[in-house]
Amino acid sequence: RKEVEQDPGPFNVPEGATVAFNCTYSNSASQSFFWYRQDCRKEPKLLMSVYSSGNEDGRFTAQLNRASQYISLLIRDSKLSDSATYLCVVNRDDKIIFGKGTRLHILP
Amino acid sequence: EAQVTQNPRYLITVTGKKLTVTCSQNMNHEYMSWYRQDPGLGLRQIYYSMNVEVTDKGDVPEGYKVSRKEKRNFPLILESPSPNQTSLYFCASSFGTSGTGEQFFGPGTRLTVL
């Protein structure tokens, strides 16, 4: 079983809809959690860090559930420009572990 | 401009011919790492460095070497490249020594080994 798992998608979602992704991690020693966005084999860029208290940045909300070992990302009022691959990232024992990513296509 | 640079951006080489991919950051970051990205496998960490002269293996270190003689530079060395090392490589850096901060990525190096 991979240490960080995501549904690869693709998620095909109409513009304006709300979409949610989950990511599970298997090692309870994991310390830090992030969502990154990657466009078409370009370099990944940080979307947001994820905290147990939850955090929101505009249309994006991220949540960490340590008890169940998953993190979530919610995108409200989706835009065409949200089409990308979303990467779940975990830091554990100084290492960085990426999920394989979830592909999102926003349809006009 | 704060950035991570990698060179070369594209490289085609032959099996067994030693090569080095350079990585440099101008943000005074302690933590640097190398990743490879392959279809269906995602990004996997090859090596990381928590500071000058401190390096450690990631998930897929076989066939690679690194060095961290200066804070800003973290070259990736393939002593004897093989076709299974054909991949898209990213270098990244972050503040702090444990990799818990935001990773800033270079633009990537597309390597083909024939």
Image (tube, coloured by chain):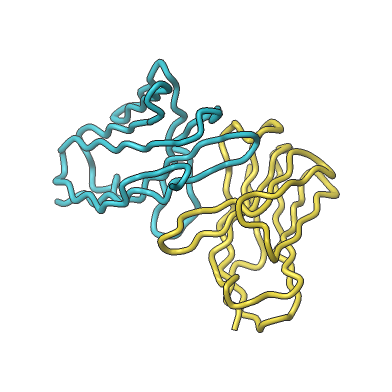
Chain colours: A cyan, B yellow
Q: Quadrant of the N terminus of chain B?
A: top right
Image location (x, y in percent) of residue B107: 56, 57
Image location (x, y in percent) of residue A107: 16, 51
Examine the image and state in which quarter residue B51 appears. top right
Residue most extreme to the top: A53
Please name the residue shown 54% across and 68% down the image: B87
Q: Is residue A9 left or right of residue A98?
A: left
Please name the residue shown 57% across and 73% down the image: B84
Q: Nearer the viewer, residue B30 or B66?
A: B66
> Can you say whether B12 is above or below B2 in the image?
below
Q: Nearer the viewer, residue A24 or A72?
A: A24
Examine the image and state in which quarter residue B97 appears. top right
Q: Nearer the viewer, residue B112 or A93?
A: A93
Q: Is residue A51 left or right of residue B73?
A: left
Image location (x, y in percent) of residue A25: 44, 36
Please name the residue shown 35% across and 23% down the image: A56
Examine the image and state in which quarter residue A4 appears. top left
Q: Is residue A84 left or right of residue B55?
A: left
Please name the residue shown 36% across and 50% down the image: A85
Q: Is residue B36 left or right of residue A25?
A: right
Residue most extreme to the front: A1
Image location (x, y in percent) of residue A30: 54, 30
Q: Quadrant of the C terminus of chain B?
A: bottom right
Q: How many marks?
A: 0
